[in-house]
Amino acid sequence: MLVKCFTVGSIQANCYIVTDEKTLDCAVIDPGAESNTIMNYLEENRLKCRFILLTHGHFDHTGAVEEIQKQTGAVICINSMDIARKPFELAYKYKLPRCGATFISEGDTLRVGSLSIDVLETPGHSEGGVTFRCDGALFTGDTLFRDSIGRTDFPGCSYKSMMSSLRKLYNLKGDYEVYPGHMEPTSLERERRCNYFIQDAIRSE
Ligand SMILES: [Zn+2]
């Protein structure tokens, strides 16, 4: 598995491209902006984009979805709670194409070449927030950051759900590379030891 990160857009969100180097199949996670940069990378490396995976529906993670979908024909995957429910209605608000979107939920597995990407529901920052797990890596969106977590003060956020999502990640077996939606990568073990919010979640169980 090869992971390439582009930090894109005005809010500097991380877009990840996860590739099976053997087959050159790939998934683009959270293309928030700068579709040209992302498309150039796909084309230069002759990658076959199978999925556009969204950790959640906020605009800084979805801004380039439409353009990349148009150019690659990839299947858009998002949890239904982040597309249809008020007050988000992201399909309308952020121009996420409704057609072709596949709704993903806990336990789903997506195949990208020989890679398997599991869906873990991790709401809190948004109702439909998910984490993608693949080959020793977690793509946590705005759930878990290095030393921090995503905001829980927007409409649709829930600190209580965030706490149980953090417990879920804490309780995964073993260590993982953590690729968050903003800022630099970290490891799950490091966050178990150093992240105040994870410790708060464990304390408040
Ligand atoms: Zn967000």
Image (cartoon, rainbow, N blue to C red):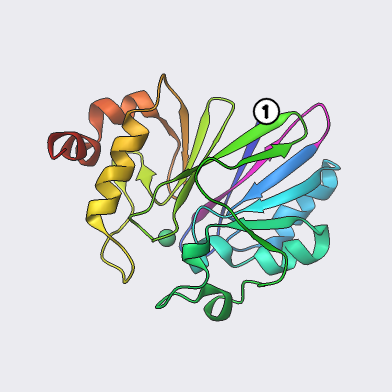
Residue 14: x and y, percent?
53, 50
Residue 23: x and y, percent?
83, 31
**Residue where numbered disc 1 is placed:** 1
82 lies left or right of 63? left
37 lies left or right of 128? right
Span shown in magenta? 13-24
For ligand 1, the image quadrant comes to bottom left
Q: Dot 1 lies on which element?
A: loop
Residue 174: x and y, percent?
41, 19
Image vertical order of residue 42 relative to residue 169, above or below: below
59 lies left or right of 143? right
**Would you say residue 10 is visible in this rendering?**
no
Name the image quarter holding the N terminus: top right
How crowded pointer 1 is (Cα within 10 Å; few <14, some 14-19, many 20+) is rated as some
Residue visible at 66% across and 72% down in the picture: 98
Look at label 1 and name its amino acid. Answer: Met
Q: Nearer the viewer, residue 165 or 140?
A: 165
Hey, which residue is sitting farthest top in the picture?
174
